[in-house]
Image (spheres, helix red, strand yellow):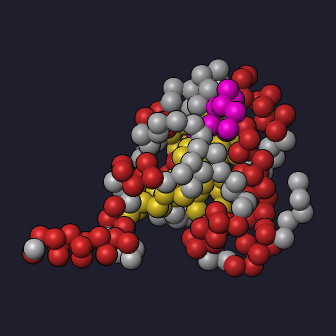
Amino acid sequence: MRGSRALASLLLLISAGGGLAAADNDPAVSERAGLGEFIPASPPLPAPAISFVDLAGNPVSLSEFTGKIVLVNLWATWCQPCLREMPSLERVQSHLGGKIAVIAISEDRGGSKTVEPFIDKLGLKSVKVYLDPKSAMQRAFKVEGLPTSFLIDREGRVLGRVEGAAEWDAPKLLQILKSFLGDEEIIKASLRRAPP
């Protein structure tokens, strides 16, 4: 009887929203989240100390983005969901400007000669594209599939992730970004965007 009361209390707590924060890092909770949905990290943990390269081959460290909200998108040219997601990343970066750094890190092994034609084809002008031909980012972030994105705060902590393609300029994800940016006017302007 006592055990069933404790179980009932626990279930009530979970259904009311209590206890979910502790479960955010539980793989079972992650599996319940749909593709393209934000999965918050609880608690936020430091992002891996990792480097990648720009299109010219110059090394760039993730720590160079400290002080900004960063949306890291891991993608590849052969990944159709990745390519479908790119325009929404471009629109978010264009609308939010300097409030956020959207960085798309290609996991293609062919480097810039493989990636640059896709940048041109997709019309990416605002999103900064980087290369990770040895998939160090995938390993460091324990990524299981592409695309996968991570939202990182100004102190370099991972706030959460999105597995699978997302519409980053959809109201639900913009609201999440808004909660970390703290600038309601920028988000309102983004919601008023003209249809593509």
To which quarter of the image does residue 148 belong?
top right
Along the line of sight, the residue nearer the viewer: 32 or 145: 32
Residue 18 is at least partly visible in this image: yes
Q: Is residue 82 above or below residue 186?
A: above
Q: Is residue 181 above or below residue 123?
A: below
Which residue sits at x=64%, y=63%? Answer: 173
- Where is residue 88 shown, x and y percent of the image? 75, 52
- Where is residue 139 shown, x and y percent of the image? 43, 35
- Where is residue 103 shown, x and y percent of the image? 64, 48
To which quarter of the image does residue 118 belong?
top right
To which quarter of the image does residue 117 belong?
top right
Based on the picture, tell me whether residue 77 belongs to the magenta stretch.
yes
Relative horizontal placement of residue 155, taking residue 13 as reference (left or right): right
Residue 156 is at least partly visible in this image: no
Viewport quadrant of the C terminus: bottom right
Along the line of sight, the residue nearer the viewer: 43 or 37: 37
Q: Total marks drawn?
A: 0
- Where is residue 41 shown, x and y percent of the image? 42, 60
Q: Which residues are magenta?
A: 74-82
Relative horizontal placement of residue 43, taking residue 166 as reference (left or right): left
Question: Given the current orientation, which residue lies at the most extreme front position?
Answer: 1
